[in-house]
Amino acid sequence: MLLEQSGRSDATPQMSLPWVSLVVTNHNYARFLKPCLDSIRAQSYERIECIVVDDGSEDESEAVLRTIQADWTRGKLTVARSDTAQGQYSAMRRGLQMASGQFVAFVDADDLLDADFVATHVACHLSGRVHVAMSTSDQWLIDKDGFLVGVLPRSKFRPFHDLPKRLVREATLEDEFAKQEIAVEEIAADANHAGYWIWGTTSSMMFRRDVLDLIMSADFDMRICADEYLANFAHAIGGTAVIRKVLGMYRRHGGNNFSNNAVLGGFVPLARRSIAGGPDPKAAIAECLEKDSEVFAEALGERQFASLVMRFCSIGRGAALLRKNKVAGGKIAGQIVRRHVRAMQSTVSGLRRELSWLFHRQPTYW
């Protein structure tokens, strides 16, 4: 192992492993807080900090958090409280502003992390074989009492059989922390242009801090499904590494805002858009790009900035924004063509999904 977790190395003593900030967002989940924070305290990776944002809870969350703080023995635990509920995205954003880690994971207070969650994700990001903006991993499904009921069927969300193979690269990484190999799929940024869902839930993801600082500069009234905004945006900037290992537990307890369908195992949404509240996540991406266009243009470069704008903005709005930022006319024209090609691909993909039972003998849940 090149770098010990203490940060010492005989060859390069000035180098040290990164800090990871685990931001727990909570709203009326007092009954699940202790198991969630116990799973964070049990992480095998040493350089972690935990930040809990209690978003206007009206149950016993405050008392539970005081008890946990008094007994906390694992580094720094910070608790921030809001008198009124601001929503998931605002709670995440507040936690990010308090975080000091080079990598950040947002954890829902009703979920659990495997002891090697942080170590495995960090090993993936520090590998020279994948270069991505975020990572995600598989999750167990557990019920309200913590009993296993299956594995979250993430592969049905895309659906996997519809993802262009040229955009997926398989790799095997050496996990220096757990002393084992990690099977990873590096998925290119273009892979979600047709609306694929290639991730697990919020608690399965880890982001590079620099990416979050870029995409979370603006606040939105996004009560739930903030992970759709973060995952789509971060992935479109730098791609995703999918770690093919179960590294956490998604709790289905009947009160989940999104995965609330008890009939089909709790992962099929009911009335998804009607419960989301606030702006559509992809419309929020377009608004963020327009608001901070100069920052994005400088950070991403002309071509990638043009690609992002034309992916999430309308053609007229996007072309005007690119001209404002002095993007070359040839690049604007090229992205308009790509936009039309994506629209055709999306139409074909939609038809294939409707006929997926005929073609693939399995339903799609997205």
Image: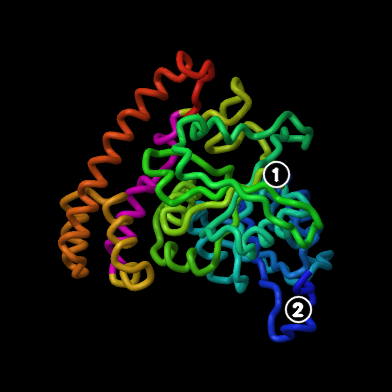
Q: Amino acid at mark 1?
A: Lys
Residue 243 is inside the magenta segment: no
Q: Is residue 208 left or right of residue 292?
A: right
Give the answer, above or below, for where 160 lies relative to 224.
above
Q: Amino acid at mark 2?
A: Gly
Dot 2: element: loop
**Residue 220 in sight:** yes
Q: Position of residue 160 (x, y in %)?
A: 52, 33
Indicate which disc residue 272 carries: none
Task: Name the residue beneath numbered marker 2.
Answer: 7
> Residue at position x 51%, y 20% from top?
363
Task: Name the residue beneath numbered marker 1.
Answer: 245
Residue 297, located in which quarter of the rendered image? Answer: bottom left
Q: Is residue 320 left or right of residue 243?
A: left
Q: Position of residue 45 (x, y in %)?
A: 77, 63
Q: Position of residue 47 (x, y in %)?
A: 73, 70
Asked whether 210 or 74 is in front, the reply is 210
- First of labels 1, 2 by sequence position: 2
> Residue at position x 67%, y 47% from top?
183
Residue 290 is inside the magenta segment: yes
Residue 305, located in which quarter of the rendered image? Answer: bottom left
Q: Position of residue 314 (x, y in %)?
A: 22, 48
Query: How far apart are labels 1 and 2 at the CA level?
Result: 27 Å
The rendered magenta stretch, by its main secondary structure, is classed as helix
Q: Is residue 35 left or right of residue 340?
A: right
Give the answer, above or below, for where 344 lies relative to 57.
above
Instruction: Name the image colouring.
Output: rainbow
Asked whether 110 or 154 is in front, the reply is 154
Stretch in magenta: 271-293
